[in-house]
Amino acid sequence: MLQNVTITLLINLIFMFSTGTFVSSCIYKAVGGKVVISFDDAKLQEDNELRWTHNKQRVYLKKGSQIKLNMLNVSEDGSLILENVQKDKSGEYKGIIYDAEGKLRKETVQQLCVLEPVLEPTVMVECVEKGVNLTCSPMSKTEVVSWMKNGIITNATGAFLHVISSELKSGDHFSCTVSNQISKKSAKEVKPVCSDTDLYATTANDDKEKEVNSENGNEQNIDVNENIFIFGLDLWWMLVILTGGGSFLLILFIICLVCVCRCYRRNKRKAKEEEEYRLTSLMPDHTNPPDEQYMQTTSERSSKSKRPLPPLPNPQGPPCVGPP
């Protein structure tokens, strides 16, 4: 049984070396960088066939002078060129060159790892009963943390560091460094100060956060998160009340503006209708001609009024009748 397993492993090793496949370590690149994956000393001939795959998915195919698939950029010598790489471009890239007869000439496999640059870390301090706890954040699984005490690198690694009280002296300051394969950044130094009566921590470069009590000589920590009150109300409640009142006044102003606009339009329309009515009453009405009977009666009355008047009576009496 053991002999069969040994023979199988040897056959697999022989097959791997006979194919000429070479798997290199991961190529680490930052997001937005440029990557070139080549065949080392192999040169692409005009009649060769070139294939590139990303995570076993074909992205480039060239047979002779004909390019049948071109999802990524490839140079004249067959090298794969990746511009402005992102994290989704990570993975395995495999390139194969065949000659004109279809025989394997060269094969390469490269593993690409695209990483984000590390962020600037900070050291969080927590005073405990038997010392102080230091935490370096933020960090991910791909990042490495190292610690420095008083500017000297220590053997401590990991995001968490515990320092016992006997090893902590006055004036000691600590810092952490976070790094990955493409970048490295260090945190600002902090000086933890812990006492039995008051537990607090201060940064080495920011002593303004401490307040000295002249009466008892003990240092006191400033509570930067102390609630602020205005007119007896908490600041946040005051902001909520002011915001609600402002919204109500805005809605009331909009309603008044709409009412004023409607009244103005109504008054303007009413004035226009009154003006049209006055103009209509002043103009003659040609639509209704006068009645013919009325016109005839009027003409008869006018003709009768033109008849001659009867003679006036003689004041001396009636005229004489007969011969004189």
Image: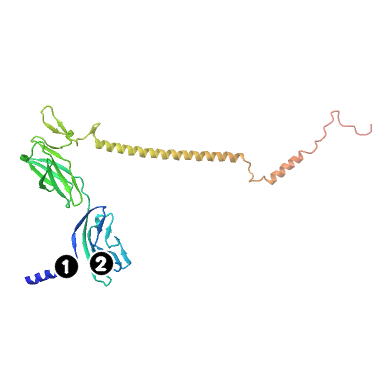
Q: Is residue 266 above or below residue 25?
A: above
Q: Quadrant of residue 312?
A: top right
**What is the number of the mark on residue 105?**
none
Mark 1 and 2 residues: CB-CB less than 8 Å, in contact?
Answer: no
Q: As shown in the figure, which amino acid type bears the numbered disc 2? A: Ile
Q: Position of residue 175 (x, y in %)?
A: 14, 42
Q: Residues within 10 Å of mark 2 (few under 14, many from 20)?
A: many
Provide the secondary structure element on which disc 1 rests: helix
Q: Position of residue 253 (x, y in %)?
A: 38, 37
Provide the secondary structure element on which disc 2 rests: strand
Q: Is residue 66 above or below residue 296?
A: below
Residue 72 visible in image: no
Residue under the image location 31 percent in, 65 percent down: 69
Depth check, front residue: 224 or 59:
59
Count of numbered marks:
2
Residue under the image location 44 percent in, 39 percent down: 261
Q: Residues within 10 Å of mark 1 (few under 14, many from 20)?
A: few
**What is the number of the mark on residue 97?**
2
Q: Which residue is mark 1?
A: 17
Residue 229 visible in image: yes
Residue under the image location 71 percent in, 42 percent down: 298
Quadrant placement of the N terminus:
bottom left
Q: Position of residue 198 (x, y in %)?
A: 10, 35
Q: As shown in the figure, which amino acid type bears the numbered disc 1? A: Phe
Q: Is residue 55 above or below residue 161?
A: below
Q: Position of residue 290 (x, y in %)?
A: 67, 44
